[in-house]
Image (cartoon, helix red, strand yellow):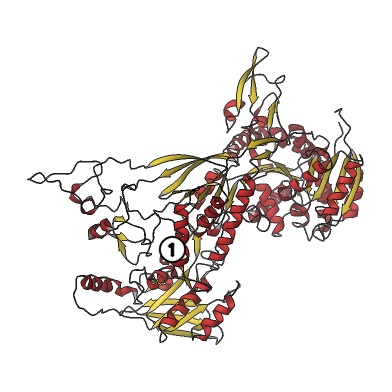
Amino acid sequence: MAEEEPRIGVYICHCGENIAGAVNIEEVKKFAEKLPNVVLVRDYLFMCSNPGQELIKQDIREGKINRVVVAACTPRTHEPIFRRALEDAGLNKYFFEMANIRDQDSWAHWHEKEKATEKAKQIIAAAVAKARLLEPLEDRYVDLTQKVLVVGGGIAGIFAALDIANAGYKVYLVERNPSIGGNMAKLDKTFPTNDCSSCILTPLMVEVANHPNIELLTYSEVEDVEGTVGNFKVKVRKKQTWVDWDLCTGCGACTNVCPPKARVPDEFNEGLSKRGAIYIQFPQAVPKKAVVDIDACIKCAGREFGTEPRKTKDGKPILAPCEKVCPTGAADRTKPRNPEGEVVELDVGAIILATGYKVMDKKHFKEFSPDSPNVITAMQMERLISSTGPTEGKLIVPSDIPKYLEWKKKVEKGEQVELDARKPHRIVYVSCVGSRDDRFHSYCSRVCCMYMVKQAMLLKEKYPDLDIYIFFIDVRTPGKDFDEYYMRARRLGIKVIKGKVGGVQRLPDERLWVRGYDAELGKPVELIADLVVLATAIEPSDGTFELARKLGITCGEEGFLKERHTKLYPVDTMTEGVFIAGCAQGPKDIPDSVAQAKAAAASAMSLLAPGKMKVEALVSEVDKEKCSGCGICVPLCPYGAISMVNYNGKMRADINPALCKGCGVCAAACPSKAIKLHGFTFEQVLAQVRTLAKRGVVEVL
Amino acid sequence: MGEEWEPNIICIACNWCTYQAADMAGSLRYSYPPTVKIVRVPCSGRVEPEFVVEALINGADGVIIGGCHPGDCHYKEGNYKALRRFKMLKKLLTELGVEPERVRLEWISGSEGLKFAEVMTEFDATIRKLGPFKR
């Protein structure tokens, strides 16, 4: 194709009032008409709409223009849409440039209309300056690995994995705990239908474990991620379990014999009880396998791992209690084991992050006497009322849990004793602890109102004499069937006070003196409670930030993973091929987590389904005639895409377009200006810079 | 010029962070001086010293480069390369008599819309104090 003189069409979008409300479109239009190589300027209410795009297509088809500048919103969301329009009309899609006069002009300078108009002109002039230098480029295709990695085995990760696996793709599900199930496994019942959490979750966990397309990697963590969309290489560290999982049947015999000295707070019961150093995460664990918490293990009988047992005088081996009791030899300590575990490499085409949340610890809230055992978080309350919890669901004050455990031990031995543990008569709930609080998090944790109502309702239904108070800033029940649920709770006689609790004081008899303010009465309130439940904020789970970094995606100010676009791309991230689901993205309830997981699964599948994908041609290229062969670029490339090759008897740099990601570090460093980054060439960027420096004057060279 | 003078500021922004932050500043209606105009590049490591020099020669009063926070580069380490180049460029410009405050490198992530607006407001004030760049 012969080099044609550029004939640029400039299309100015009103974006309804979004642009036209601050920028004088007519004035900008007149300005743009005078810019070099601009042959026509049009404006339209919504350029991205079908008729808007048609305007461009028609002008291209009629041969009026061969370059397009759209002055509208941000190329981050709309560049692909307009490029497709060019393609449809038969013009190379890289003959397109966008002028961001909404996000970076009209919106930001809404109250300075003249200046916003002036800035719009300059932005458009710069885009035209670049458009004059655009070149046609050809896209490449890459094959897509038909496998997906899901990180996090909570309810979001489980649903994402199942949906993708059911569609026929191979899924790796990585979970850092010994079992999948996540936080949901800790919950007693779930709002707004009060079905038992385990009853709806456990079958799904089993389905995951038995699915032929799912490879479950529990007690494992993502260590490193290389590659890009369609072809990621992921290193996963399978942590050392210290138990032979091929032999372990999950009978739990070892967990019962682990001595008291080796017992540590049980994470699953939120620290309300203790577990052994060798433990099974929870009774319904999937896979149901024991692991040894090596930091807690006291190495009974002097049995270090990987050593032969000492012998008694008569030659019998002295074994640790856990290995002695293990019926299959899974807990055998003779075999040497690598404390670092094992690293496996996975090739996947897409990654879904569903790393979930943690609840804030009560220790941060000194005003609520966190040192009192009877001040607990709502998650601890879940464990306290759960039939798999420390008290098998019997409601007693947490300060008496040790008494309960003593009693249980005696009963198991066959003794006939009465349980001497105090039952709470009055429970006070405190909402927005750490959420909507300037000292901690500005956001609303979204689930607290509903779970407080739920717990109160469950308790009140079971123990009608209980006196339950809930202190709210305001009750937020916007979900489907949520407000009906709240009203049901109110009818049960749960007392709701609009106002804040200022302080909780621990009394000598382990009861609590709660002082708050009733905003409706306009008066302070004081209560003596047996139990205070804090609805502490939801935070991103530990390691979210580090994982995000490995994948090149960002976290918002509050530490949750950032989606590509809040409204339009809620499960996509800035790294193509990486999707997010569940509370890793922000606090949400189970229905929303599941919906998002299914969305992420669908997005990953629609990415992989075609088998191959177009890769933008925005990569770097060496002009071997200009290259001096200095080799400066070679070590600079973060992807090892540059090598020195023999070119007419001389060593010259060469860039492998399949490896190049188009960052342009080499182009910026080349002393001979021999490297061109397509789409952001030296001349193109310079033209923009100069035009803006000259306040909108486009140079014609 | 004279009393009518308004600074002319060019922000060369990485597509993956500062450019996104600028979009966010707009969508959240955080305002900043309209003197700031943005040029989009794929990475702060793409920024050639000539871009900054040419901006100043041709009429800009201040140039600010926006990149990803250390460790957050979309292309692994382009921002470190930008930092090294920037330090050298700043030294050179200072020796040539350019006030060092006229050029700046900032790490602004894609979620820091407010920071973008704050930094640009502050940079505009700095340039106003310095007055027009005398070529």
In the image, farthest residue toward the left: A313
The residue drawn where x is 19% and y is 78% is: A416
Give the percent coordinates (x, y) of residue A425: 38, 84
Relative depth, front residue between A366 and A296: A296
The residue drawn where x is 45% and y is 78% is: A458
The residue drawn where x is 92% and y is 49% is: A30
Instruction: Please give the chain letter of the residue carrying mark 1.
Output: A
| Residue A548 seen anywhere in this rendered image of the structure | yes
Residue labelled with disc 1: A185
Callout 1: SS: helix
Relative depth, front residue between A266 and A27: A266
- Name the image quarter holding residue A5: top right
Give the percent coordinates (x, y) of residue A170: 53, 46
Q: Amino acid at mark 1?
A: Ala
Relative depth, front residue between A425 and B131: A425
Q: Is residue A220 left or right of residue A637?
A: left
